[in-house]
Image (tube, grey):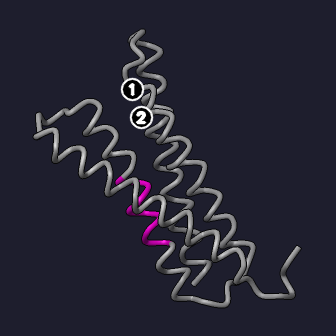
Amino acid sequence: MENVWSLRLIRLAALFGVIGTAIGSHMSGAGSYAFRPIHAHILLAGWLSVFAWGVFYRVYSVRNQLLVTIHGWTAVIGSIGLTSGMWFYTMNPFQWNETVTLVYFIIGGTVSLISFVLFLIVTFMIDQDERV
């Protein structure tokens, strides 16, 4: 299960990396830094964190496979929800109601927070012979 989630998370991280650097390139070329917080969160919460989780699952075996799956899904939903929610709330590209964008942003951020807490728990559930 760890190998499956490792590849999924690394692929998602690669997608975040492409999107984050494209936004950074656009901001630089346009001379407008309106996307700065979104760009930063895509690269940190999307690319860096998700990539680190993918590498962790490639290196370690976790005793609780259900927890790996739950963490994997919260990582995917939380990273996408947080970054897209920030974009919806900050830029409001579709002119949605402000309450809708705020709730979307909060839910995405909350799922992301849950994902980080689950990952903390996962780090204590690795096989004993693999601890460093």
Q: Secondary structure at mark 2?
A: helix
Which amino acid is tagged 1?
Answer: Phe
Q: CA distance from mark 1 to mark 2?
A: 5 Å
Question: Is 36 in the magenta?
Answer: no
Asked where in the image residue 54 lies, by quadrant, the reply is bottom right
Identify which residue is drawn at 55% across, 77% down: 4
Identify which residue is drawn at 44% across, 13% down: 29
Relative height, residue 55 to residue 131 (above, below): above
Judging depth in this view, the residue of 18 and 47 nearest the camera is: 47
For disc 2, the neighbor class at 10 Å (few under 14, some 14 to 19, many from 20) is many
Tell me which secondary structure the magenta stretch mostly adopts.
Answer: helix
* Pointers 1 and 2 in contact (C-beta within 8 Å): yes
Residues in magenta, as a range: 72-81
Identify which residue is drawn at 39% across, 45% down: 83
- Numbered label attached to residue 35: 1
Identify which residue is drawn at 11% across, 40% down: 96
Relative height, residue 110 to residue 92 (above, below): below
Relative image position of residue 20 (x, y in whole percent): 47, 36
Instruction: Give the position of the C terminus as an image quadrant.
Output: bottom right
- Numbered label attached to residue 38: 2
- Numbered label attached to residue 108: none
Relative height, residue 42 to residue 9 (above, below): above
For disc 1, the neighbor class at 10 Å (few under 14, some 14 to 19, many from 20) is some
